[in-house]
Amino acid sequence: MSHSITELLKSGVIGDGGYLIELERRGYVDSGSGREKVGTGRGSGQFTPEVAVENPEALRELHREFLHAGANVLQALTFFGTREKLNRAGYGADTEKINFAAVKLAKEVAGDRALVAGSVSRTQLTEREGMGSLEKSRDHIAEQIRLLKEAGVDFLILETFFHLAEMKVALECAAKAGLPAVATMSFRPLITKCSDDHTPAECARVMTDLGAVAVGANCEQDPNRMLPLLRQMRGTTSLPLAAQPAAFRTTEQIHSFTKLPAFPDELETIQISRREFHEFGKLARNEGIGYAGGCCGCNAAYIKALAAGYTDEP
Ligand SMILES: [Zn+2]
């Protein structure tokens, strides 16, 4: 694709959906729930992207589905692909292989019809070892970004960071590598503050100052729950907003699906309908959200509904 992400953001970008939950449902990703309590945020071996080398056809097919549904960007499945996280899952030695394979697959499917983003997420070191581990995080994130750049991604999506401090590290690494970055924080258990106590508005301001090309939120909430925090962000940034909500219903008390008892083995009981993504698409367009996609729980049907809402098709 000849356009850059910055150009594409001017007219509005439809993102893709969630890969790991969908591929877990299809039997190709380990949720980790057979071994331990998942969702504590402490981090373990679950939900890592080795499917890119173990079952590439399954990943290729999901990319095709999102592209067919109307996505303008395919995210290479490199989420949780730092050596740190992969080490804990037993795949540390395959860090290069997994990142390269995931980008290659996404690029093959995208061709000249979509941009390819490298997905970079938290290392989980901050949750496990505290703020003293940030320099270790920097090494791991810098390494992954170097691999993604070598593999030829068009830009980066820094996503599902719980701590603004680690997001800052990631944005600094992206800038150093010279890759444009869409930066989205995840808020849990409530949308009012991230894990190191910054409001969505503060997060947006800091991510803007550190050179992101779009800022926003992803995962954890359904669209309606996420909208108020995006509106807060709107107040402190003039950048395009990015939103990739989850397709799971959250509660007044707990605004994040990974903190609900249904995660990860009973998610079907809190699945929202694709209709809500159609509505979200319309709202996103009306409120000037420049990058609208989905996260966990969104298969191609949700992205198709979102795209229809965003382009306001009848
Ligand atoms: Zn998600």
Image (cartoon, rainbow, N blue to C red):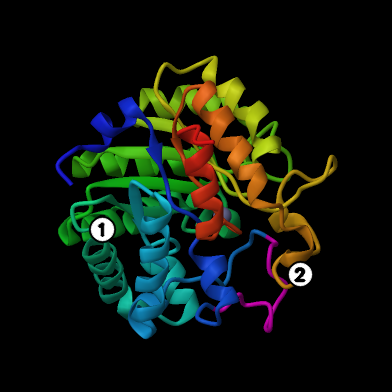
Q: Amino acid at mark 1?
A: Ala
Magenta: main secondary structure equals loop
User: Left of 17 or right of it: where is 175?
Assistant: left
Front residue of 82/230: it is 230
**As displayed, is residue 215 above or below residue 223?**
above
Give the image location of residue 202, x and y in percent.
Answer: 55, 23
User: Left of 34 or right of it: where is 56?
Assistant: left
Q: Is residue 31 magenta?
A: yes
Q: Quadrant of the C terminus?
A: top right
At 44% across and 48% down in the image, what residue appears?
Answer: 134
At 29% across and 67% down in the image, what residue appears?
Answer: 99
Give the image location of residue 43, x and y in percent.
Answer: 59, 65
Q: Amino acid at mark 2?
A: Glu
Residue 13 picture quarter: top left
CA–CA distance between discs 1 and 2?
Answer: 32 Å
Determine which residue is flagged by label 2.
266
Front residue of 116/193: it is 116
Mark toward the start of the polypeptide (1 vs 2) = 1
Residue 152 picture quarter: bottom left
| Residue interval drawn in magenta | 30-40
Q: Is residue 110 magenta?
A: no
**As displayed, is residue 197 above or below residue 236?**
below
User: Left of 279 or right of it: where is 301?
Assistant: left
Which label was assigned to residue 110? 1
Q: Quadrant of ligand 1?
A: bottom right
At 27% across and 64% down in the image, what residue appears?
Answer: 109
Front residue of 150/244: it is 244
> Would you say the beta carbon of the disc 2 residue lies within 8 angstroms of ligand 1?
no
